Amino acid sequence: MKTTFLRILIIICAVVWSLGASAQRSIDLINDNDRVQLDEAIDLMDNGKPKDAIKIFDNLCKKYKDNYILEYERLYAYYLAGDFKRIVKDGPKLYKHPESESQLYQLVGNAQDVLGNPEAAVKTYDEGLKRFPRSGYLYLEKGNIHLLHKRYNKAVECYLRGVEVQPDFASNYYRLALLYAQSTEPLWAIVYGEVVCNLQPGSERANEMGKLIYDLFQENIKIEGEGEDKAHVTLTQNNTIHMNPDTTDIQVPFPLMYEMGTMASPALTEFMKTKKLTVPMIADLRKDALAHIDSVAPGYYNLSLLDYHRKLIKDGHWEAYNMWLMSPGAEDETNQWVFSKGGEAQLVEFDKWFGQNRFVPTEEKPTVMTKLFKTHEMNIPSIEEIETAEGCRQHRDDALRLAKWYLEQPANLDDITQKQIMQFLVIWMTNTDEFSFTVSSNAVSGHVELFAAYMAAMTEHAIEFNVSKTDEAMHCEVMLQVIDYYKRNKEVLGTVDSMEKYLEMDGATLRNTLAQEYQKAQNQQ
């Protein structure tokens, strides 16, 4: 594995147990004696002897035909042994295996990339995303290739999408933090880096990100002027404020609103007096920025990390949290704070609190803002603009944006905006000539909101993965999105028997059921 390809090693023992419930079936088929051999092979790989591990896997694969876990682990051993051509040759043979998961496409794509064919790797990741659209791993790898070729905006798009679909996967946040640290928007580097510290506390990455956060505050909050009498804060250079003349709705970018809060903080005055920006001062600046946001725009910004900050402040652990967070960049200051200012007792209490109150990102609670505002003008094109196929092509990006928005918002049966988007998507899907949509589920018929969610998911999937015609894989992924939408909005939508049946199924059974329903619908047409 070449570090120049920005690869993230997956620890092999973690891979074995992270391949999901479906792969568990393959493990269950292996008897106890052979599991000892499997463990031995894994130990060999962990100790840098993948070729010896391959010999064991060869024997096991002969004994257990078509066993996914064994075939996958043998491929991984080939990867560690540097036999990338073998992976590119044999890996795709497992794509149609019922237990295959996104890591398989990741492995094949990585091998293609190392062999000098990044275009093929991107195609492999895209193929994997058609089947596993919620794989943060694949978006990470796709972003890494764009980054390698200095397509920075494309890389950011991939990492952000990875954050959106798999919010508890730290690597996409890590890449975003490193990119934004070199940009004109260092506040986003601070935000993403802080998420990494919370997802992987005590890790090398957490130490790296903690130091990065501390350094960025030091670099972007300075005293300037001939008499050193002016504080200069540069957490963002996005100073554009948008105003809708019809609604008088003013849209202020989150980093700008945050920076404005720091500028009004008494901690900035203290900094100008002492000429030294300490971690407690930074904590006060962050606290005052949050207070400013809550005062000027309460509930406006969709950033769950802010909710965690509010809880830390309320429970009395804010200073200790910031000392812990930035200690890798301020070791001497942290030690002095612990031993001379009663910080040790605070850290002990924070440690107890942290163990029971971890920041755990979920899809229901966005970790970061993929949209800048919780509520804003949606700019829905008129129906007249999409009456023709050409009009639909011109508003393809709008269709994707509105479909995503509809699926992410809590269902509101009285929301006019949601109804307008519902109407737009129906007309766009009807008039576009780029995609052919087929409704293949009776489960959503007769329920307006679920049908709208189905259409939104179809639109999103078709545009994002350039799928011109509904197929079984697309239907299954779309229905999984609809089921998730129902689960999140059940109280508003009411109980739907067909959805409840889906919720009772395990992952493999659910996917098989959806595939059978699709085939049945096709046979009836």
Image (cartoon, rainbow, N blue to C red):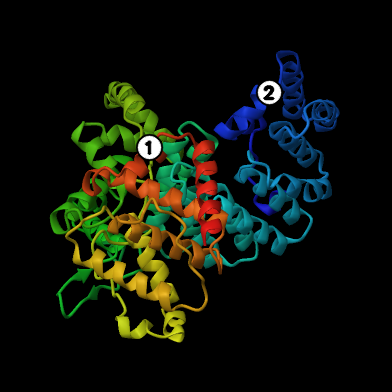
As rendered, which of 450 and 289 lies closer to the eye?
A: 450
Tell me if 311 is positioned left or right of 182 in this view.
left
> Which residue corresponds to the image point at 46% horizontal and 54% vertical from the top-left?
478
**Residue 340 drawn at (x, y percent):** 30, 25
Front of the two marks 2 and 1: 2
As rendered, which of 313 and 331 lies closer to the eye?
A: 313
Q: Which three-letter amino acid code belongs to the residue tagged 2?
A: Leu
As rendered, which of 30 and 371 lies closer to the eye?
A: 30
Verify CB contact (< 8 Å) between mark 2 and mark 1: no
Disc number placed over residue 267 in the picture, else none: none
Which image quarter holds the N terminus?
A: top right
Q: CA distance from mark 2 to mark 1?
A: 34 Å
> Which residue corresponds to the image point at 40% horizontal and 34% vertical from the top-left?
504
Tell me if 429 is positioned left or right of 5 in this view.
left
> Which residue corresponds to the image point at 35% horizontal and 37% vertical from the top-left?
359
Disc number placed over residue 360 in the picture, else none: 1
> Which residue corresponds to the image point at 35% horizontal and 35% vertical from the top-left?
323
